Image: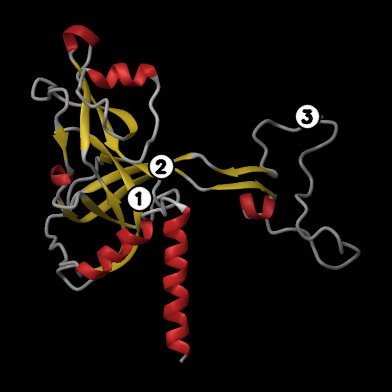
Amino acid sequence: MTTGMIGRKLGMMRVFDGSGRVRGVTVIELGPNYVTQVRTPDRDGYSAVQLAFSGRRKRLTQAQRGHLRKAGLERETLTALKEYRVDDSSGYSLGQVLNCAQFEPGTFVDLTATSKGRGWAGGVKRWNFRGGPKTHGQSDRHRAPGSLGAGTTPGRVYKGQKMAGHMGDEVVTVLNCLVVATDPERNLLFVQGSVPGPRTSIVSVRNARRPALKAYTPPVFPTAEVEAVIDEAEPVEDAEQMAEQNAEGAAEQSEAQE
């Protein structure tokens, strides 16, 4: 079993587990993952497996084509490559397919993804500064950062001082997320809580150090709600399909008004 897999964030929904507790979950399309390289202690000094996630990538560089040709995956639409450590890599082979069955409900995972980019943001939005007073002549200082440091000593601004700047678009790791349920047939993983990044973003799922729950009953998912989350995450491929969807929506709206 690998220590992690690559997936794609689809969206969020709410479910009730076997004990009746409501849990807000994020749906991750975890797989299929293809083994593209096997690291061995004799050749590389450690044991690891490089995995590739099948997504919507259109073009591959010549270096990537040559690397994937060895695993027989040159024609696959691969989105991301990532390496995960394993105790013994002898049981893996090039081109092998992995799914989310290795993650069991009741266990915990660590999720790594790139957060949403917020552009250039001020101190109030980026660092939760409270802003300046609204009275006593401070009519234009509501969201100003205020003083940045003393004048004579140190006579400069320390590096890393909190102030306005580029917000978001950073690699963020969320620790100890509960695996609420899995669906190996559709390669879906349901984890409790939110996951960084927008829909369809790439997520790395790793086994957490926290031990599994002793008593946990996974929920029975309503198929209609899961399908709705999957459909919302699917992007529109061309303008014609978008026009058809807009026309169908307009027709449904007119019928409802009548």
Q: Secondary structure at mark 3?
A: loop
Q: CA distance from mark 2 to mark 3?
A: 38 Å
Image height check: is 59 above or below 231? above
* Residue 134 placement (x, y as % from top left): 81, 66
* Residue 150 placement (x, y as % from top left): 80, 37
Three-letter code, disc 1: Lys
* Residue 33 placement (x, y as % from top left): 22, 36
Q: Which residue is mark 3?
A: 154
Q: Which mark is residue 62?
A: none
Q: CA distance from mark 1 to mark 3?
A: 46 Å
Three-letter code, disc 3: Pro
Instruction: Say which residue appears at 48% left-offset and 45% top-offset.
Output: 115
Circle 1 or circle 3, nearest the eye: 1
Q: Which residue is mark 1?
A: 9
Foreground of the two, 130 or 227 = 227
Dot 1 surroundings within 10 Å: few (below 14), some, or many (20 or more)?
many
Quadrant hosting residue 101:
top left
Q: Which mark is residue 113?
A: 2
